[in-house]
Amino acid sequence: MSAESASAAVVQILGGVLLAPLLPGLVQHWKARLQGRRGPSPVQPYRELRRLWSKSAIDVEGATLVYRVAPSVAAAALVAAVALVPAASSAPDLGVGHSMLALGGLLALARFALGAAAWDTENGFALMGASRDLTLAVFVEATLVLSLAVAALAAGTTDLAGIIAGTSGTAAWTSPGLALGAVGFALVVVAETGRQPFDNPDTHLELTMIHEGPVLEYGGRDLALLHWSAAARHWIVLVLAAQVFAPHAESPWLQLALLPVVLVVLAAALALTETLVAKMRILLAPRLLAVGAAAGLLGVLTRLVDIA
Amino acid sequence: MTGALLVVGLALIAAGSGLSAGRRTFTTGLGVQAVGASLAAVAGFAVFASGGDLGAVFTSALEPRLGVDPLTGYFLGVLGVVAAPATVFAARYLVPDARGRVTAALTGVFVLVLALVLCARDPLTFLAGWELMTLVPAAIILVGRHDRAARDAVYAYIAITHLMGVGTWIAVLLLADAGAFGGGGGLEAGSTTQIAIACAAIVGMGTKAGLVPLHAWLPRAHPIAPGHVSALMSGVMIKIGIYGLVRVLVEWLGETPDWIGVVVLAAGAVSAVVGVVYAIFQHELKRLLAFHSIENVGIIVLGLGACLVLRGQGEEQWAALALAAALLHTLNHAVFKSLLFLGAGAFERAAGSLEIDRLGGLLGRMPWTGGAFLVGAMAIAGLPPLNGFASEWLTLQVLLAVPANAGVGAGLAGTVALGALAATAALAALCFVKVVGLVLLGRPRRGRVATAVDAPLPMRGAVAFLAVACVALGILPGLLTGPLAGLAPWPVDDAPTRALEVPWSDALPTPGIFLFLVLGTALLVAARGRRRAAPVPTWACGQLVEPELGWTSAGFTKPLRLVLEGALRPQREITSSVRGGVLQEVRYEGHVPHLFDSAVYRPVTRVGLAAARHARRLQSGSLTAYVAYLVALVLLLLAAVRTGVIG
């Protein structure tokens, strides 16, 4: 393995597994600053993970194995997704490949596990969150595939490492396709990270939450796994945004070196949208996501017209 | 050798069918049927793997001939893989009274008829098998039930499949006329005959496959059949429609105009989305599963559409891969759908009803059947590392190849289909979270469910076998895709591998994903440890959790219903009764009507009936009038011959 691909693998695994909690920490920190509060330190998620890991898990009366295994299944699916999404174009195959079309399946597995666990506890608020999450996921998944399709067509491959290489430099930006794909993907980022206008990560008011709903019954190490999964979801979509839908360098070394900078900028952008945008009525959110899907479709269309 | 195996297998099914009609030999008979089906499956897959032919080859002449080629072999394999567990399941599922014995015997006949269509090598045998394939399950349904609802459903089933099935006759007879039954012939690309055959086949065989809007019979007929027959109908019978489409569109017609491929893509996308959306709002488990069959046939047909479009572009390697995607999903759907229908049959036996709001907690009560059902639900939801994920992934790949290789129109169709398939997968996940939650998890929602016990060994074994097949096909789908792509009637260089591979230097390492997920989960479960606090009741804002607080199917799907309100037109009715100025009771009723029934089928039936009323006037009952009709007809024919219109 060359030095390039080894370091890409190290960044991908260390970043995805260990540094991921820093991303939501940074967003919360800056959001507080933007709102004129002092807010928690960026490393607050690590403190919470340590606290939760030292507590015992909680069993709900009458719940089966599905409830107990669901957090581990969700976290394992996210670990696989972290291994799947390359940090740079030189990233090696870590055993799960780099297929962009498999990403949706892994995220869906995590969602399925939590939805099933919500039914297992029969907690009304968990079910409310799960049903909303799964409804939004219909539109998120279509937007995800269509916006990635733009990049895949520009790069001529569905292999994510190949896509990063194919969309690097300036050549890919000569046609408006990739920019339209970026519009769609931006909405996917906001939806998958559970942020406004789709969801409000700060709310613990049972009636309004989406992603916080299905985790309501969990405690201790189970909850720690679920918090880590949410952080890993930040890492996955933000790395894709940085290395595919933002202009990036051709050399893998430069890609790796600039990745932290772009991630920090993107986290700041998330904090800014959180501050500026109000939460949307849940039933209107699919329309916004449909706009993202339409942008992806237009992106493909511009490419088709370019060729024809 | 293989031929002998197949003949022995089919003979055993016939013998078992006869045996199972007897009171003493009922169980033995079904067992013999299962052995026969297994042998037929082995023989079928052997022919598929060897790539050779057995028996006769296709002929356009009207003389009965039978034979097996690799495509037939593959579908015989699919048939056997479903029929063997289904007949084992039936041995304890059916009660050996008069009705049960006739059903068991007819099950064997049904399997043989399906094999007959697959092995037919001439138009006559094919059409005969095709019609019997419709009639035998109708007979089985009527043996089991003769209430009015079942009779109406069977009537609608036969009416729709026969009226639209005319398309199959037209396609097959035109093919025979052109000498192209079996390929070859003088069909020019883009000629009127070729297009007529393609359209007739899409209508006729699409009806049998359950494509929207020709699907209305499917959610009527499948739920009322006995569990193991539903499994055969959804798992195999509708796939015979796919078999016909592959034969005609891909194999025999040669290159068709682009728009035919786009029409097939559109039919697939519409079927997939409509099927899964209506499935979500069903309250009866087997009806829900029937709607999912429409969805999955849509996914298969998406692969076929991509195959036709890509071949039109000269991308033969991709086109072969698209065919492989369609055929792989055919097998995968046969496996997980028959698993789900058999599971539903077992639940119905144990709990007395399949109203999904009134089950619950069956994973604890029936761990074997419930566990297998959970695997099937995850497979149909397209979740890794199971088989549904593998074939949906491959279908997404080939759909993405359409805009990469085709022009603006077809490319746009392919992209829309790509988005539709992604949304379909997410909708299926939503639906099966609901099903798993309401059927398997939580507390029993009704007294009888709480005392349910797991099914007897043969039934458990049948569903467990299919669950193992779901996992195995999810780990090693790559073993099949090479030979499946080789079924394309044009030369392809196939490279069978462990992982799924596509030309874009991109592969899906299914074994790696399986190991990653299984080991990852196991490690995390171990890391989490067993230490836990005492069980607590679930949080309901401090209230006691009463059964009345339990969520229902309608509640869970409400966000989606509201989002899609404009398209679905859900109906709501709230009646409140007030007595003496005091509100006594508020009743809420709501359901999502199947709009195709009211908007498409009802107007058509109305016009048809009105036309029949007018036509009835011809039937005056007077002999002179009939003689006049005959004379008029003879004169008309003579005039036609004279002017050279016919003859």
Image (cartoon, rainbow, N blue to C red):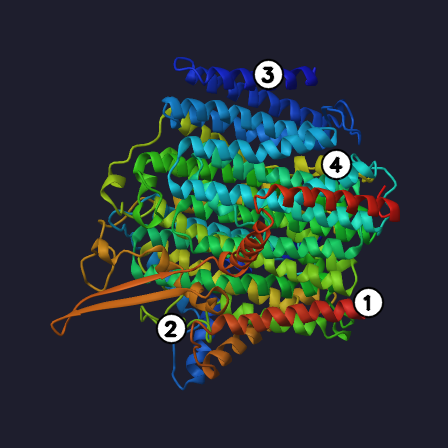
In this rendering, which labeled residue sits more in front, label 2 or label 3?
A: 3
The residue pinned by badge 4 equals B487
In this rendering, which labeled residue sits more in front, label 4 or label 1?
A: 4
Q: Determine the chain carrying the residue at label 3.
A: B
The residue pinned by badge 3 equals B11
Q: CA distance from mark 2 to mark 3?
A: 68 Å
Tag 4: Cα neighbours inside 10 Å, few (<14), some, or many (≥20)?
Answer: many
The residue pinned by badge 1 equals A307
On whether disc 2 and disc 3 are found on a single subunit, the reply is no
Callouts 4 and 2 close, C-beta under 8 Å: no
Q: Quadrant of residue B91?
A: top left
Callouts 3 and 1 close, C-beta under 8 Å: no
The residue pinned by badge 2 equals A202
Q: CA distance from mark 4 to mark 2?
A: 55 Å
Give A235 or B410, whichever is nearer the viewer: B410
Residue A29 visible within the image: yes
Give B150 or B20, whichever is nearer the viewer: B150
Q: Secondary structure at mark 1?
A: helix
